[in-house]
Image (cartoon, helix red, strand yellow):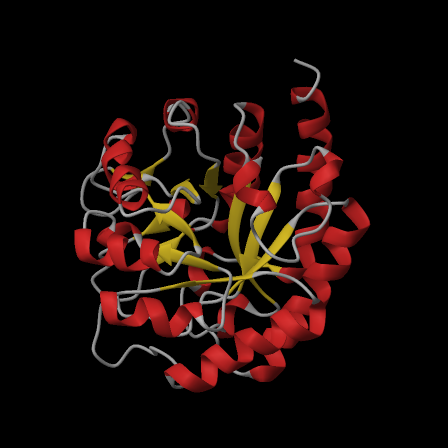
Amino acid sequence: MSVLQNIPNIKHLESGNFFLLAGPCIVEGEKVVMEIAERMCAITDLLKIPYVFKGSYRKANRSRLDSFSGIGDEKALKLLAKVRSEFGIPVVTDIHNPEEAEMAAGYVDILQIPAFLCRQTDLLVAAAKTGKTVNIKKGQFLAPEAMCFAAGKVREAGNNKIMLTDRGTMFGYYDLIVDMRAIPKMKQFGYPVIMDITHSLQQPNQSSGVTGGEPAMIETIARGAIAVGADGIFMETHPDPASAKSDGANMLHLDKAETLLRHLVEIRKVVNKF
């Protein structure tokens, strides 16, 4: 895929595998970031999966004011740049307002637009103008067909390096559902389509102000996504989800990553025959 070929240092594109965006929800500190990067690089090299390290340098969308939102922008971005340099892999992070685009672009290879912000024209245009690949997450409130307009804003701003990610659709106040029809519908736009297999299992708006989740269903969503033709998988993983400072309730335990990815590689082999 031409979009992937434009991402610096991405490996194993010749394998025919799906590609993977994976890492912690937020950059918590150097120790955990480097541990996750090292283990995920080893797994993806073994399985020949094109890999992008994911980590948010700051989280702007928190339910409560006292929720952890980061270790400091510059410190977190420098850690992401260290991952990129030491492991020779591309890195993706979220941005939340137009002023962040140019700053973050100096440290990472892919700028990600959070789902709640996917209609923000100024944000999309600012991301596009950096020249970086832009991964746009589908809003929980949008039909997949509507993502053509988000992609169109980036394209019309002069950047055709676009990826689209589904992360579920609101189902009442406290749950999300995944409609697998969204994957082929968004693929019709001509961009790589990714399934976020952890955020799509969130249970938001809990009375505690802390989002819940169903991590036991991660492999179910992942298998379905690969089976219907997803180009990539997005997931958050952590060596101890219970102590993660953001989204621990729906993360994949790092110890389970290799088994999951082995299963998905086998499904992909079958899909590639058709």
- The quadrant of the picture occupied by the N terminus is top right
Picture quarter containing residue 30?
bottom right
Question: Please, is residue 209 above or below residue 245 in the view?
Answer: above
Q: Total number of numbered labels?
A: 0
258 left or right, relative to 112: right
Give x and y (percent) for residue 248.
Answer: 45, 64
On screen, 159 above or below 84? above
Q: In the rendered view, would you say 66 is above or below 128?
A: below
Left or right of residue 80: residue 147: left
Q: Is residue 97 visible?
A: no
Q: Which residue is drawn at 47% across and 78% down?
A: 77
- 129 horizontally vs 90: left or right: left
Relative image position of residue 16 (x, y in whole percent): 70, 32
Q: Where 125 sits versus 165, above or below? A: below
Place residue 90 in its image quadrant: bottom right
Can residue 48 be seen here? The reply is yes
Name which residue lies at 70% across and 21% down: 270
